[in-house]
Image (cartoon, grey):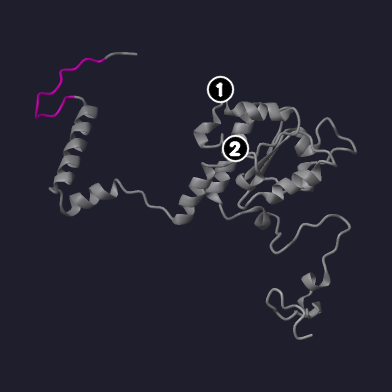
Amino acid sequence: MDVIRSKPGTFGTLGTEPAQRDLKIEQRRARDFLKGDLAGQELEEYVESRLLTTTLDKAGAWAASNALFPATFGLACCAIEMMSIVASRVDIARFGFEAFRASPRQADILILSGRVSIKMAPVVRRVYDQMLEPKWAIAMGACSSSMGVFNNYAIVPADKFLPVDIHVPGCPPRPEALAHAILKLRKMIQDQPDLGWRARYDAEKTAELMPGYELPAHLTDPQAAEPVALAPLTAPGQEGEGA
């Protein structure tokens, strides 16, 4: 690094370096603004150069993308890589992502870190359903994305039972790969905050059902609903009166 020595400006005069001159100018304009000496076009330019305008939706999306709470949920060997993103090497706390929550009611993102068996899929889906919207999901590793090396009858990919937002390739992927997926999800939330999984999968006003289960008729066809007889309200202890 080169050290450049220059003669400093005397008190009350501008310095000789361009950066020093700009700093002096900004300091004097700030002083004049606080004293109320700026007026007219000069005041408008000074205020406009220091204002940042946005919308409430964009501000909310920015806040949500920088305060994601992952669920404390590990499935297989990818969970070890997921745990390491909170360490000093990757330090995912820079993006407000390190607060893993032990309850799905306090989490808004589910990381499927490992293979998912057919018996485990309903459990994963139940955890996801208990999370409050807006919520997101990341399929970490080849197993949860495409069954990977365990391509047999017992493993199911995450897309078969869960709306996945980001896929992370690798077996297992490095912590840097998961950090990259987090940044992609963060950008997606900021750019398209309203594009939830129902809009992406064209699933508005739909319900997810287990195979072999059918909705009652009154839910699919409101005209087929039978009238329900309501019992008269009585005070406690007066059930037998008036019979």
Q: Which residue is mark 2?
A: 182
- Residue 212 image offset from top left, x and y in percent: 89, 58
Question: Is residue 15 a member of the stretch shown in magenta?
Answer: yes
How busy is the neighbourhood of tag 1: few (under 14 within 10 Å), some, or many (20 plus)?
few
Q: Say which amino acid is labelled 2.
A: Ile
Distance from the alpha carbon under mark 1 to that under mark 2: 16 Å
Residue type pointed to by label 1: Arg
Q: Position of residue 12 (x, y in %)?
A: 9, 30
Q: Earlier in the sequence, mark 1 or mark 2?
A: 1
Q: Nearer the viewer, residue 131 or 142?
A: 131
* 187 lies left or right of 144: left
Find residue 62 and name its label.
Answer: none
Which residue does the numbered mark 1 point to in the structure image? 89
Q: Quadrant of residue 168?
A: top right
Q: How many other residues sit within 10 Å of disc 2, few (<14), some (14-19) or many (≥20)?
A: many
**Residue 176 drawn at (x, y percent):** 61, 28
Q: Quadrant of residue 208?
A: bottom right
Which SS does the magenta portion mostly show?
Answer: loop
